[in-house]
Amino acid sequence: MTLFPWLRLIPWILCLLLAVGVYAAWQRGDAYSAQADSAEARVTAANHNTAVANDTIRAMKQQQQLDDAQLADRAARDTRINTALSSAQKRIAALQIAALQRPATDEPDCINQPIGADLNELLHQPADPGPATGTPATVHGAGGSAAAAAGGDVGRQ
């Protein structure tokens, strides 16, 4: 054995190579584990993003349904308004035709007068001077003359 003294080192060298191989395999395992963890994290992130996207799509569909319902309500309301306007225009046209077909009279045409015209005329008429004795005018205008003609005084009743 003196010829080949380094032959005694072969088992030690083999053990050292085996240890290096085990260490390299362990490091590769960690790398594979890190890659697997990274892939798992990417899958988890993709699943989360998919869930968020699905929730967003669902919310957009619900908003679209609400918008469609509001548009339908608005269209129904517009239809009701247009129907009411159309019937009012037809009624006005019928009243105008009826007014034109009426025989002419000395009475004022009430269709073309504002609603409160008679009331305004009554409020702005001069006060009735009352009877010839100089009593004050009555609240009701012509009633003072009627009371004077009857011989009484409306203000003292």
Image (cartoon, rainbow, N blue to C red):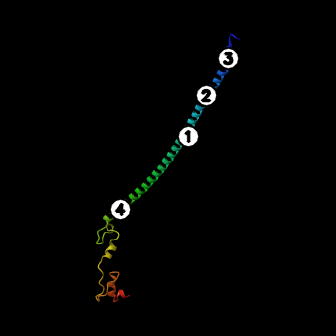
Crowding at label 2, few (<14), some or many (≥20) Cα neighbours within 10 Å?
few
| Residue 155 place in picture, x, y as percent | 35, 86
User: SS for tag 1?
Assistant: helix
Cβ atoms under marks 1 and 4 closer than 8 Å = no
Q: Quadrant of the C terminus?
A: bottom left
Sequence-earlier tag: 3 or 2: 3
Cβ atoms under marks 3 and 2 closer than 8 Å = no
Q: Quadrant of residue 122?
A: bottom left
| Residue 116 place in picture, x, y as percent | 34, 71
The mark closer to the camera, 4 or 2, is: 2
Sequence-earlier tag: 4 or 2: 2
Tag shown at residue 137: none
Vertical relation: 109 (above or below) 131? above
Crowding at label 1, few (<14), some or many (≥20) Cα neighbours within 10 Å?
few
The count of marks equals 4
Q: Alpha carbon of mark 3 to alpha carbon of mark 2: how far?
A: 27 Å
- Residue shown at 51%/46% (left/top)? 59
User: SS for tag 4?
Assistant: helix
Q: Looking at numbered disc 2 in the image, what kind of residue is underneath it?
A: Gln
Q: Alpha carbon of mark 1 to alpha carbon of mark 2: how far?
A: 31 Å
In-front residue for pair 95/147: 147
Tag shown at residue 27: 2
The residue identified by callout 4 is 92
- Residue shown at 65%/24% (left/top)? 19
The mark closer to the camera, 1 or 4, is: 1
The residue identified by callout 3 is 9
